[in-house]
Amino acid sequence: MQSLKRALGLYATTAIVIGSVVGSGIFSSPSQMARDLPSAPYLMGVWVLTGILTLFGAFTQCELVGQMPKTGGLYEYFREVYGEGLGFLYGWANLMIAGSGAIAAISFFFAQYFENFVALPHFTHALTALGLSESTPWNIPLLGAIFPYQFLGRKLIATGLVIFLTALNVRGVKLGGTLQSISTTMKLLAILAIVVVAFAAGGHVGSVSHITSSTSSFSGWTLIGAVALAMSGAFWSYDGWGNVAYIAGEVRDPKRTIPRAIITGTLVFITLYLVVNMAYFYILSVEGVANAPGDRVASQMMFAVVGAGGAGVIALIMMLSAFDTTNSSVLTNARVYYAMARNQIFYRPAATVHPKFQTPHIALILQGAWSIILLVTGSFDLIVSMYVFVNWVLYALMALSVFILRARKPDAERPFSVPGYPWVPAIFILFASAYVIITLVADIQAYNAGTQPLIRSVTGIALVMTGLPFYYYWRKVRSMRSESSEGSD
């Protein structure tokens, strides 16, 4: 069986780490966070705290990568530590919720800002002729309503982006990695440029006092609850740092390269997020951030500094950012399904490597097709709302696996050891568990209050568990194939 090609070096691998994280969240999440916790100092503290926890998680994953530099990343770690069943459910969660949902959501974000420059059709007349409208819902039992006829023009653009990036990544991991290096570098320079403009040219509207301003009267448990809500937005913006482990089989010297890339990339995006938020608060104040129209904080900041022309600049930067993050998601996540198929617990052709381009082309195409289904139906809105909770359950299990492996294999080679062990992974597990519990309680309260139609966290877990019948089916097929092979011998 043909194997994948080790074609990615340190720069491209680091670019994938940064590109997987720095997407749409940093441009919109601060607005909701400021409504949840209206205090600039507390919010900066939230970004620092969640950044430190993210770094702890990165350190923890680096130890696993060093021990098991295999294509598939967390899927392979879970399979090794917890057994094949949980490994499969991790991969299924990636397909159903995390990976494909992120591709659909971020490509749609790209199309939203594309519409700033090109008027996109809504197909109103065609829908009317069919007796439909943009607001006609599809009701999904237990989940709620989706609106597949909304924003059809945007969905066409987003679909085109998914097809283009899937085709590009089919043609070679080095090509995808090169594009990632270029687009991530351009994105970082562009974001830093708007920060410089904000501080250098925003003196007429900005004030250092804004960075220390607060309208919060929270205290005690109310403050803790507000901080937890704000942390949810920060975790969403920081998420994706572990995706690079999926492509370990295509990185040169992965035992050294991937840990270096994860740590370097994590430090870069934490620093970037802190300076960007300081710029937001400097120009807009915490109240202005909270009330940014459409949660478009970066656009509002640039409008305040340079006028209407700044909105177009921000739209271009956001398109670049979404393009870069979509490419990173397409490149990395398909390797999980490839690894599952190689272990014969997924659609078997997904293990095929293209004879010329040496990429998992079937896995890439399957991922692209499912992402487009989520995109066109509009169901990614529901999916993404469950994403962070499910991911943090898995992150807690990831950190716990470090303790399990150290107990099972105390003398095993560890090219990278978690600094501050056992405290660093233990703190990460503690906060991840607390975050999961708080999110679950908040979801139940919101459901009981009638402010959301379902308990999203529980529904997310239920969606993951829908993979069990498929797991038992593919495992049975593998067993039958093995018995047939032994019988023919």
Image (cartoon, rainbow, N blue to C red):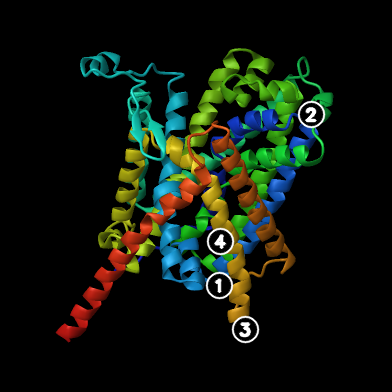
Please tell me whether mark 3 sits on a helix, a strand or a loop.
loop
Residues under labels 4 and 1: Cα distance? 11 Å
- The amino acid type, in three-letter code, at marker 2 is Ser
Q: Which mark is residue 148?
A: none
What is the quadrant of residue 274 in the picture?
top right
**Residue at image location 47% in from the left, 31% down from the top:** 109
First along the sequence among labels 3 and 2: 2
For the residues labelled 4 and 1, say whether their Cβ atoms are less than 8 Å apart: no
Q: Which residue is mark 3?
A: 411
Q: Position of residue 335 (x, y in %)?
A: 40, 57
Q: Nearer the viewer, residue 406 or 480?
A: 480
| Mark 1 and mark 3 residues within 8 Å of each other at the beta carbon | no
The mark lying in front, picked from 4 and 3, is 3
- Helix, strand or loop status at disc 1: helix
Where is residue 71 shown, x and y percent of the image?
A: 44, 63
Q: CA distance from mark 1 to mark 3?
A: 12 Å
Q: Which residue is mark 4?
A: 258
